[in-house]
């Protein structure tokens, strides 16, 4: 009987680890800074592109993206300071050198907190066939340097390694 319990415990632990490594929840938080290119046409009409970096820490017992480095490149146009056409791509670089890519869309108001949605579009290594989606909440922070924007970003969602 003890041998059966030991075997079942071993199998349960190994299958749980396997499942956790191939699908799960995402709750990643961190801070980032993005360099801005802005064309100001006046009256809150702007064309903005950005390229920046974010460092993420997995929260609430999740593991995805813990201590990852993330680069996001995107853009948007505003009318009277509001936008509904933000798009971009983010590259997650993991400690082992593997990558995952997301594309995202967002809307909001320049200089304010915002929300966007993302979906995985591929990657390298074990993330080559990743799928999943979620939301990103952006908490705007006053940038310390002109020509940059800074924010706290909170990624929440789910993923599956296919």
Image (cartoon, rainbow, N blue to C red):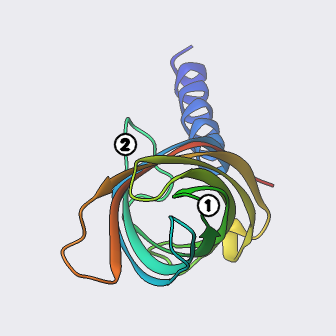
Q: Residue at x 51, y 64 (%)?
A: 44
Are there few (<14), some (14-19), or many (20+) residues within 10 Å of tag 1?
Answer: some
34, above or below 1, in the image: below
Look at the image and tell me whether residue 160 can be seen. no
Residue 138 numbered mark, or none: none
Dot 1: what SS? loop
* Residue 91 on image: x %, y %: 59, 74
Q: Alpha carbon of mark 2 to alpha carbon of mark 1: how far?
A: 36 Å
- 15 lies above or below 100: above
Residue depicted at x 51% and y 58%: 81
Q: Which image quadrant is residue 36 in?
A: bottom left
Q: Quadrant of residue 9?
A: top right
- Decide: is 145 above or below 160: below
> Mark 1 highlights which residue?
79
User: Is residue 84 or residue 69 the one in the foreground?
Assistant: 84
Height in image: 84 above or below 4?
below
Q: Is residue 38 visible?
A: yes
Which of the 4 image quarters holds residue 143?
A: bottom left
Does 149 sit left or right of 92 as displayed?
left
Residue at left offset 61%, top offset 51% = 107
- Choose the circle earlier in sequence order: 2 or 1: 2
Find disc 2 in the rendering and name its residue: 59
Quarter of the rendering occupied by the N terminus: top right
Say which of marks 2 and 1 sits in front. Answer: 1
132 vs 61, nearest the viewer: 132
């Amino acid at each position: 009987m003890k041998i059966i319990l030991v075997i079942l415990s071993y199998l349960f632990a190994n299958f749980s680890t396997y499942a956790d490594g191939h699908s799960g929840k995402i709750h990643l938080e961190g801070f980032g800074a993005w360099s801005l290119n802005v064309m100001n046409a006046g009256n809150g009409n702007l064309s903005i592109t950005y390229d920046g970096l974010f460092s993420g820490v997995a929260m609430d017992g999740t593991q995805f993206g813990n201590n990852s480095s993330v680069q996001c490149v995107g853009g948007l146009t505003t009318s009277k300071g509001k936008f509904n056409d933000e798009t971009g791509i983010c590259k997650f670089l993991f400690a082992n050198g593997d990558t995952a890519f997301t594309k995202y869309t967002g809307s909001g108001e320049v200089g304010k907190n915002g929300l966007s949605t993302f979906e995985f579009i591929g990657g390298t290594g074990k993330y080559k066939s990743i799928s999943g989606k979620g939301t990103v909440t952006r908490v705007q922070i006053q940038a310390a340097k002109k020509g940059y924007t800074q924010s706290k970003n909170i990624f929440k969602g789910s993923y599956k390694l296919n």
